[in-house]
Image (cartoon, grey):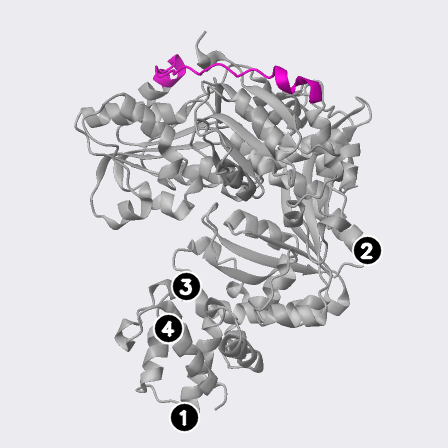
Amino acid sequence: MSSAFQHRHCFLLQGDRRQILSDFQKLSQHLKQPLICAHDDSDWRALSHEEQADPAYQFNTCSFKQAKQQLGLSHEAILLDLTSGLSIEAIAILAGTVRAGGLFALALPELDWLATPDQELARYLPWPLEPDQVHSYFKAYFWQQLEATDSPFIRFDDQQHSAIAPLPELLEDVELTQAQQQAQQIFRANPQGNNILLAPRGRGKSTLLGDCLAQLVNKGYKVALTAAHQQAILTLKQHYEHLKPNKDLPFYAADALLSQSEQWDYLFIDEAAMIPVPMLKALANKAQCTLFSTTDYGYEGAGKGFGLRFCEYLEAQDKPLKRLTLTTPIRWGENDPLENWLNQRLLLSPDPQVENTLNPEPPLCTDTPLQTSFTQLRNQQWLAQGSDLKDSFQLLLNAHYQTSPENLRWMLDDPSVQGFTLAKTSPQQNTSKLVSVAILTEEGPLPEQLSQAVLEGHRRPRGHLLPQSLLAHEGHNTAANYRYWRISRIATNPADQQQGYASQLLEHMETVAKQEGIDFLATSFAATLDTVKFWLKNGFQAVRLGTTKDQASGCYSLMMVKPLNASVQSQAQVWQQNYLANLMINLPRDYEGLEPSLAARLGLETLTPLQRAKLSGFTNKDKQDLELFAYHYRPYLTIRAQLARCVQHAISQGAIKPSDQDCLLLASALKSPASKTDFSDFSLHSRKQFEQRLKKIVQYLITC
């Protein structure tokens, strides 16, 4: 039987490193280029270079942080070392690279793994929490899944090491499947349009692209291929070269393609979700026909950003759009136990059973009024309500472009995180349906000394996104004094949208927050017209607009708050006035790509001419912001509006003249977007030199 129809072999290996390596070596003896991945792979690298190491057996290593570099590759044998840390992201990524008949092994220590310190846990905890202060409910949950009846992992006990036998050598499968051929035909039928290839891991996207590329090159078309990095296309390249085309693989870096004026007949973008959306939009105009290929589920969530944001953009273009998909796995066999276990037990992709609970059949009875119920959950409470965890995470995966497998551990292990759900129930039918879910994190307050260090740019403690940003980017020195509930995710079942359920959930959360003494509800999100309208409708007000676009969404981040008691109402008003004063200057200059309909809803439309005039003056707050830039580490992008008001004030007071060299430099810097500042005329050769010169000028201006 061809290896493409075999399942993968999964093992749990326990012992010290040498014992684990010995077992892994026996199992992978006939497999090519084994890979070992660990929290810190330095010990494994050292083992590979020891004198007693078998020179005929070589393996590669990588750290958990480097696991994303394996996307787009294919492996025959992988060992994931979990002895000192558990990375759900590394598991999700690397499991999807293992070929049919290949080896996927997990390494565990000899002693009680649940009692072993987890060096990955700190990444999920906000300041001041440390791993030894927190119980990892996710680690216990993961252990339960390893021991579940459907777990694909085989465990060797101490007496079985000598009986370990090598796995057989893998065969090569290079012919396109019927599903791939059908997708290829649909692509060929759209030579003047955009094409999207979305499919789960292991369905043969790279093989299909390599075949299409080779055929088009042999026919003489001008063809180009790009990806986030060349490492991601090795499988594609191998299939392309197997077909022996008449020229080398036409790979170009994305920025190199965009810098050229040349147009192409066909442009292929592999693992497109790893490329920033603004760059994807520009690439869509570089060829007569484009094919964007990416994974929609299964590793780090970016595929959803591609599906939810970029696909909407392509649908609005004049070019015809074709959607391609591949459902049958070819990297491994149908109904593969490892894939099923990852999907169902670790919620890494759509589970039909979960989808059915989100859209139950038969529908809830509508003859009598449906009741609404709310649930508040955190940490182990999610596990006690297993169906709530599955349904909520499924809803977040389907609705939010940045939900990733790592969020599951974050929800279970971070004590500052909690979830709220809204369900519709029918007493007559005794049924319930999850409608809306929100995930929030409690942030602040921060102690005075730490707050000052954040304000000056010396410290960036884990977590506390909202007070940190208001301190470090907006200079609001009181922001650390308050308690915030920052809503990180909110989603509603598509069948129930536009009926006010998310707003009802927010109202309930507000009621609970007031009871618990929270000062602000808050949110930070990729700003689109619809999302901004939603938060404005629910009483939130903007206090910060990000200075750079999010890579996954291609949008600027907007931060909004809703004060929950009278004592903080005036504080929120001050923050918003500061935001509007800066936006008046920054919006037309630094956000030139912002859609006019969105720009019109950011707050400036509510200002009267008198209010605009009042916000145009140079203030003590502006001076404080510039001092933080000049003498500390406040980012330049966050003080451009303040600097513009300072320059106008200095000129009006006669402190500087428009013809002064320093004033000319300021004028050049402030008249154009920060990304387009040209400082070469002033004998400055880098942005660092420019900012150093600018700090000295600002120091002079604020002491005049």
Q: Nearer the viewer, mark 4 or mark 2?
A: 4
Disc 1 versus disc 2: distance between alpha carbons? 53 Å
- What's under tag 3, amino acid-wise? Asp
Task: Count up the numbered dots.
Answer: 4
Disc 4 versus disc 2: distance between alpha carbons? 49 Å
- What's under tag 1, amino acid-wise? Gly
Q: Which mark is residue 689?
A: 4
From the viewer's perspective, is 288 left or right of 303?
A: left
**Quadrant of res 685:** bottom left
Q: Nearer the viewer, mark 3 or mark 4?
A: 4
Disc 2 versus disc 3: distance between alpha carbons? 40 Å
Callout 3 crowding tier (Cα within 10 Å): few <14, some 14–19, many ≥20: many
- What's under tag 4, amino acid-wise? Gln
Q: Which residue is mark 3?
A: 590
Q: Earlier in the sequence, mark 2 or mark 3?
A: 2
Callout 1 crowding tier (Cα within 10 Å): few <14, some 14–19, many ≥20: few
The magenta stretch is: 157-182
Disc 3 versus disc 1: distance between alpha carbons? 28 Å
